[in-house]
Image (tube, coloured by chain):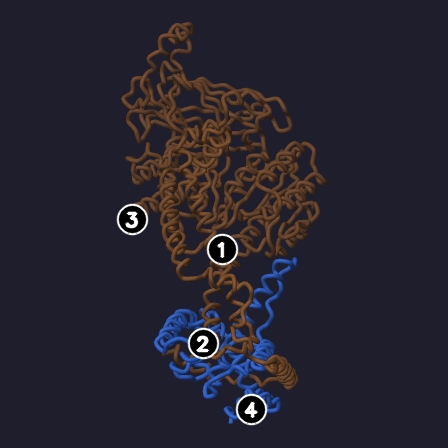
Amino acid sequence: MDAELIERAQGGDREAFGQLVSRHYDFVHATAWRWSGSSTDADDIAQEVCVKLGAAIRSFRGASRFRTWLYTLTLNAARDHRRKLAREAQTFRAYAAEPPQDAPGENDDEISSELWAAVRALPERQCDAVLLVYGEGLSHSAAADIMGCSEATVSWQVHEARKRLKAVLGKEEV
Amino acid sequence: MTVDKELEKLSHSTPPAATPEARARALAAAMQAFDTAGNNALAPQGNAKGWRQSSIINWIWSPAMNKKFLAGSALATLLVIPAAGYLTIELTRNGSPIVDQTEIAGNLSRGEASKQPVAVAPQAPAENGTLAEQSVVDAQALQDKETPAVAKPGAARISEFDANDIATLTNKSEGSATALGAAKRSAPAAPGIAPQQQLAEPMAAIAPSPAPPAEGRVQIQLDPNRERFANAAANPIKSVATDPVSTFSADVDSASYAFVRRSLTGGAMPDPQSVRVEEMINYFPYDWPGPENAAQPFKATVTVMPTPWNHDTELMHVAIKGYDIAPATTPHANLVFLIDVSGSMDEPDKLPLLKSAFRLLVNRLKADDTVSIVTYAGNAGTVLSPTRVAEKSKILSAIDKLEPGGSTGGAEGIEAAYDLAKQAFVKDGVNRVMLATDGDFNVGPSSDEDLKRIIEERRRDGIFLTVLGFGRGNLNDSLMQTLAQNGNGSAAYIDTLAEAQKTLVEEAGSTLFPIASDVKFQVEFNPERIAEYRLIGYETRALKREDFNNDRVDAGDIGSGHSVTAIYEITPKGSPAVMNDDLRYGAANNAPAENADTARQGEFAFVKMRYKRPGEDKSALITTPVNDSNAVAAVDAAPQDVRFSVAVAAFGQKLSRIAAVDSYSYQAIADLAAASRGADTFGYRSDFLSLVRLADGLSQR
C-alpha cells in the first residue's frame, strides 16, 4: 500500500502524496511527542517532518524502509527543535532582565515525570536508543537501522542508559 | 529489575492525539513543499552538454586538488605540526613565555635582532603556527565549498538518502558537543583540562623569577581553569650589604586563604599561584597589643625568634594592630552593593550565597546607615536607590528579588555604583562600594586597565571599594586584586556562609571603617647584625624604596581593629646559612661610617611605617627600633599568636612551593599550630589545622 503510494507520489501524484502524509501523520506526531514531551512541540516537529517529506519524497529509494526513514526524519527534526528551543532560551536569558519562568511541562500522562525527565536528560544517542527500544518497542536491529549504527552499538547505548537511569532513579527510590 | 519495569511503562504511554488544526496545517505545508519540489523536478534533469554541472570554483579547484599536489602540502603539514608542537613544549619548559616575548619585541624594536640569534628562535613557532593555520583555513574553505554541492536539495542526484541523513545525524551529534561547550561559558572547565593544569603548576613554581620583585605588581598570568591569580615570584633572599632596605605596602586582604581552603576541602592542592602567604597570615584574628587611643591609629610589636624550619636563621615578626573604633562611635556608613547578576552567577555558591551574605551585613548595620543596590548584567541598573537601614524590609526584599541573567558589563556597573555612592555621600562617614562578583565582570569595550583607571579616579572622591569574590572556575583574582588595591579597599573571597559571617559581621568594623590609608612599611636592616633577609609574602605589594616617602604613591589601607603581620626570615651575620659571599670591595668603605654611632650597633633593624588618616593627604611616620630586647631564645618562648602566625606562614610557603620550607613537614606545621591554638573562639585555627592535615594527605599522593 505504502509502496504504491510512494511510487505514485514520486511520479508527481499530489493526491497520493496527500494520502501518504495523512496516513503517517499520526505516527510522526506520536513519535515527535515521545521525543519532545510536549504536544505543542510535537505539532511543530510533525509539521517540519511533513515539509521535509514533501521536499524529499521524489528522491527516496527503498520503499520497504519508509518507516525507518520516517523515524530518522522525525528524530532529526526533534533534535533540531530541541536545540532551537535551547538556543532561544539562551538568547532570551541574555536579553531579558528577568529570566523566563520555566514553562510547565505538558506531558499530562500517567508515566512518572521523573522517568521522562531522566530519560530526556540522557545523552542524545542514549535517549534515542532507549526511546526506540522501550518507547517504540523496536528490536535492537531495527533501532540500529534508524540510528544508522550497528546493532551492538544500540545494545551498548541501551546498556549505558540503563546504568545511568538506575543510578538516577535508584537514588530517588531509596 | 526496577529500571526495566519503569522502562516498560514508556511503551504503555499513549501519545495525545494531534489536534485537527495542527494536522491540517502540517498537511497543507507538506503539499506546498511537495509542489515546490515538483516544480524543480519538472526542470530537465541531467545536462545535454555532456559534462557534469559544476561551478567555476570547482573548475579552479579540481586541478588544484590533484592528488599529486595534495601529497606535497599534506607532507608539509605533517612536518610542520610536530615541529610546532615540539617548539611549544620547549618554550613552556624554558620558563615564562611572556617575558620572552617582550624581550623579543624589545630587541626587535631596537633593531638588534640580527645580533641576537637566540632571540629569533622563539619566533619560529609563530611562523609555523601561521602556516598550520593557513592550511587549516584552506581545508575549511574547501569543505565549505563542497558542502553546498552535496546538500543542494535540487541536485536530485541523492540516491542514498538514508546514508545522507545518517551522516548529518552523526555530524550533528559531534557538533553538539562543541556547541554545548562553547555555549556554557560559565561551566567549570572540562575534567580533561585538570591534569594539564597540574602539570603546569610545578613548571610555574620552578620558573626563574622574570624580574626583580622590587618592580612591584609583577603579574604572571598562567591561565588554567580560567581563573586568574595575581602573584609574582617569591621574594628572593637579599643581602643586607647591597639592599639594606625593604619596602612594601600593607595588605589586609584575606581572599587567598579562603581560596586555598576551598581547594583543599575540594580534594586538590591549590594552584601555587593562588597562594599569597601574607593574606593567609592576615586571615586570622590575632591579639596583638593595640594602641591606647585613636590619636595613634596603630602599634607595631616586633618579635625576633628562631626559625622553626631552619636552625641557622631567625624570624623577625612584625605585628601591627589597628585602633579598634568602639561600636558606639562608628561613623555612619553609606554602602552601595554592586552585585554581579550575570548568567554565570546562577550557581548555589554564587548568587544565593551572596544574597545570604548581604542579608547578614544589612542586619548588622545601624538604622542611620544607607544602602543602595546596583546590579550589572547586560545593562547596569539601579535596583534600590539609597535607602536608610531603618527600612530594612525594603532592602531585604530588594536583595531577595535579585535574579541571574545576562552577561556582565563591569565598567558600567562600577560607574553607576560610584554615582550612587556620591549621591548619598556621608561627610566624615564611610562611603563604600561593595562589589560582589564571580570574576569576569568585564564584557565590553573597556579593558582591565580602563576599569582600574575609573576606580583610581573615583578614589579621590573618598569612596572606598571592597571586592568580594564568589564561586570558582571563573574567578578573576588578579582583576579583583587590582581593583581592590587601586580603589582603596580590600578583597575577600567568600566560599561559605561562615566566611561571609567572618568577613561581613565579625570583622565588619575592619571591613567597613578605615582608620588609616596608604599604609607603607619600610624595614632597614643593620648590616652589623644581619647578613641576609627574605620577606615572606607581600610579593604583589612590594614598593620602591623611594616611594615610601612619596605620599602620592598609593598603598594598602587598614580598617578598624585590623591586624597586619609581616614576617622576615633573617640570617644573622656569621651564620652558616648565609647564601651570599661578602663583598670584596664593599666592606672596607663601610666600616668607618658604622663606627660613628655605637648606640645603634646593637639593633637588628629599624621599622618605619607611614600612614595617612582617612581624608588627609599628608602622611605620618611611626618608627620602632628592633634590638635584643625583642628577641626570644626559643620558638616555644615566643608569644602564642606569633607562633601560630609563623605556622601559617610555613604552611603558605609550602603550598606555594618555596624551597626554604621543603624539609619542614606538614606534620611539624600542624604540631606548631596545635600548640599555639589558644582559645580559638570562632574555630578558625582548628579549621586551619584540618587544612594542614588535608594538605599533608594530598601531598603524599
Q: Residue B277 at what x, y percent from top left?
A: 42, 36
Name the secondary structure under disc 3. loop
Look at the picture and state if B2 lies above or below B605. Answer: below
Q: Residue B354 at what x, y percent from top left?
A: 56, 50
Colour in which the image shows chain B: brown
Say if mark 1 contacts mark 4, CB within 8 Å.
no
- The amino acid pointed to by label 4 is Arg
- The amino acid pointed to by label 2 is Ala
The quadrant where residue B633 appears? top left
Describe residue A127's horizontal placement relative to residue B421 as left or right: left
Q: Is residue B336 visible?
A: yes
Mark 3 or mark 2, earlier in chain: 2
- The amino acid pointed to by label 3 is Arg
Circle 4 residue: A8
Q: Residue A144 at what x, y percent from top left?
A: 40, 78
Say if mark 2 contacts mark 1, CB within 8 Å.
no
- Quarter of the image that includes the N terminus of chain B: bottom left
Name the secondary structure under disc 4. helix
Same subunit: marks 4 and 2 = no
